[in-house]
Image (cartoon, rainbow, N blue to C red):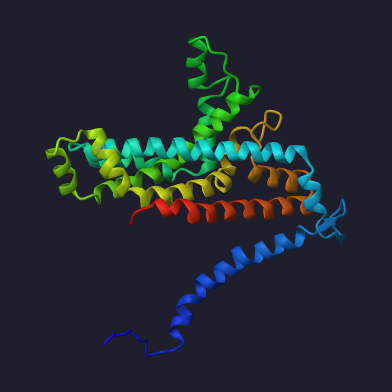
Amino acid sequence: MEKRVTLGNPVLPYMLLAPQIIVTLVFFIWPAVQTVIYSTQVQDAFGTRTKFVWFENFSRLLSDANYYSSAQTTFFFAILVTGVGMSFSLLLAVMADRIIRGASLYKTFLIWPYAVAPAVAGSLWAFLFSPSVGVAAYALDKLGFNWNYLTNANQAFFLIVLAAIWNQISYNFLFFLAGLQSVPRSLIEAAAIDGAGPVRRFWTIIFPLLSPTTFFLMVVNIIAAFFNTFGTVAAITQGGPAKATEILVYKVFNDGFRGQDVGGSAAQSVILMTIVILLTVIQFRFIERKVHY
């Protein structure tokens, strides 16, 4: 016989759910609905009158070459941040899992960067690589490397990728380390007795057992690369030089708040959300099949 927990007051479950429902409605559902409405409107220069234009904002946006350039930059940026960041985080987790003495202190230092907000992380890296006062820029100059990310598009892109990876690396490290510690030691010891080396043990035993963690982090990192890196780009390059680092989430802000194109900015937000949803669905539809729980 199945036992079910019941509450004496039938209203209590709804009262417990009410705060989260209110937060979701006010900060997620309502802004999303407003964005969809604004994407079908055009405002005058003073923002006092609006005109319903159906899908004119979307058609104008999809015929803009600058938008496709920004989308290409964003996809390349997301691939680098996700791929390189997760790979380096996994390497750090494997090394930390093998440390015996001072492991707690080492792991604590690796967790700290996640406490830094993206805008603050961007400011730190911008200061380090500042062409005029940056320590890293000074060292590169002494090595004969002409560093100036304010005028060089490739250097600016490299810097925002580096800052985004550094800011996300602790989050990935935590989950990978937890996954490594949950791998049964008996399997690793049995493989070692059978003559399997460390590399073969990792690829045939440890990494397949980490597939649920890897899949989860891949989904989270791609979403973070599309949305949570706004502060990093705003603090370091502000989309420059010459829009070389203007990823989609920053373009929404740039066109909406600076260009005062509310309708076009809202249309960009709708497309950006649609892209992220489709990417997440594709990952769950095709990649999750290879995950072994």
Q: Quadrant of residue 119?
A: top right
- Say which quadrant the C terminus sits in: bottom left
Q: Residue at x 84, y 56 (%)?
A: 42
For residue 62, side relative to residue 82 (left or right): right
For residue 168, side relative to residue 223 (left or right): left
For residue 80, side relative to residue 191 (left or right): right
Instruction: Give x and y (percent) for residue 144.
Output: 52, 9
Instruction: Give x and y (percent) for residue 190.
Output: 14, 44
Q: Residue at x 56, y 51 (%)?
A: 279
For residue 183, side relative to residue 137 (left or right): left
Looking at the image, residue 42 lies above or below residue 242 = below
Q: Residue at x 50, y 56 (%)?
A: 285
Q: Residue at x 66, y 22 (%)?
A: 151
Instruction: Give x and y (percent) for residue 197.
Output: 20, 33
Please state which of residues 214 and 4 is positioned toward the viewer in this rendering: 214
Please state which of residues 165 and 122 is positioned toward the viewer in this rendering: 165
Please state which of residues 66 and 210 is positioned toward the viewer in this rendering: 210
- Say which quadrant the N terminus sits in: bottom left
Instruction: Give x and y (percent) for residue 64.
Output: 78, 41
Looking at the image, residue 171 lies above or below residue 274 = above
Q: How many marks?
A: 0
Looking at the image, residue 195 lies above or below residue 214 = above
Q: Quadrant of residue 115?
A: top left
Q: Is residue 86 visible?
A: yes
Q: Is residue 166 visible?
A: no
